């Protein structure tokens, strides 16, 4: 399997302005729930021309149930030569990490940036009865008080999961190179700088 070549192991973690050592064809976008993974994945696909698959659309069936064949569909996706996808759903994360060439980590300030985004998004989706995957709707806002896995409570509870799993990959020397973006400004700088240069 082709990988981007790095001069040393320490170079596997890149910042917003570090040049990419090649043109990645399989890109993951990771971060806490509400960090902006889907939006960034869409923007990366638009900038690069790489095919885009939204993992939520493969996973969520009617009534928020997992669709039959989800793992098989992700296995087929991962085997492809080019894609941009969010790094989520524990069952398929190892498979995607094994095939990816680049993992973009949205490591944004949680309480100041990510949580307000989750709250605004949930309010907008519920207030506007916005249909999501397979016709699902956000549940009533009051369920934040009763449902342990309400999206806002889920985001708070799992806010460190992506960072911990990425650190584990790096310590173990597995997985793709990582670009760590720590602010909205860094996201823009990376899109306009290293990513644009790699695909220019």
Image (cartoon, helix red, strand yellow):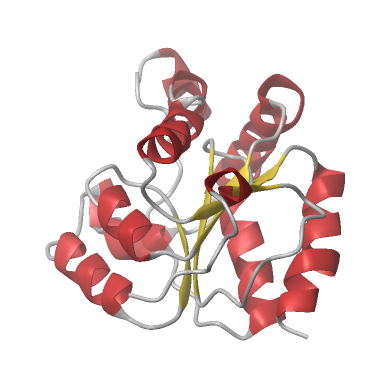
* Left/right of residue 36 with respect to residue 150 in the rendered view: right
Q: Where in the figure is residue 199, as x and y percent of width and height?
A: 71, 82
Q: Is residue 21 above or below residue 104?
A: below
* Left/right of residue 134 with respect to residue 166 in the rendered view: left
Q: Residue furthest front?
A: 7
Q: Is residue 123 above or below residue 95?
A: above
Quadrant where the N terminus is found in the figure: bottom left
Q: Residue furthest top?
A: 145
Q: Nearer the viewer, residue 42 or 62?
A: 42
Q: Where in the figure is residue 174, as x and y percent of width and height?
A: 36, 48
* Left/right of residue 13 with respect to residue 101 in the rendered view: right
At horizontal 28% and vertical 50% (from top left) the residue drawn is 94
At horizontal 74% and vertical 37% (from top left) the residue drawn is 182
Place residue 161 in its image quadrant: top left
Q: Is residue 168 above or below residue 43?
A: above
At horizontal 44% and vertical 66% (from top left) the residue drawn is 54
Asked if residue 24 shows in the view, the reply is yes
Q: Nearer the viewer, residue 32 or 56?
A: 32
Q: Nearer the viewer, residue 7 or 55?
A: 7
At horizontal 37% and vertical 15% (from top left) the residue drawn is 146
Q: Where in the figure is residue 80, as x and y percent of width and height?
A: 33, 81
């Amino acid at each position: 399997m082709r990988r981007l070549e790095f001069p040393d192991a320490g170079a596997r973690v890149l910042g917003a302005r570090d040049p990419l050592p090649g043109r990645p064809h399989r890109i993951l976008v990771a971060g806490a729930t509400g960090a902006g993974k889907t939006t960034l994945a869409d923007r990366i696909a638009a900038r690069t021309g790489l095919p885009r698959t939204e993992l939520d659309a493969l996973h969520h069936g009617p009534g928020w149930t997992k669709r039959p064949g989800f793992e098989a569909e992700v296995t087929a996706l991962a085997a492809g030569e080019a894609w941009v996808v969010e790094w989520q759903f524990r069952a398929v994360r190892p498979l995607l990490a094994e095939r990816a060439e680049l993992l973009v980590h949205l490591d944004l300030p949680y309480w100041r940036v990510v949580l307000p985004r989750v709250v605004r998004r949930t309010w907008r989706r519920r207030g506007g009865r916005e249909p999501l995957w397979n016709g699902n709707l956000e549940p009533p806002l009051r369920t934040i008080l009763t449902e342990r896995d309400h999206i806002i409570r889920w985001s708070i509870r799992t806010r460190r999961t992506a960072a911990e799993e990425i650190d584990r990959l790096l310590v173990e020397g597995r997985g793709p190179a990582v670009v760590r973006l720590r602010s909205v400004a860094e996201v823009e700088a990376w899109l306009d700088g290293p990513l644009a240069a790699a695909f220019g």
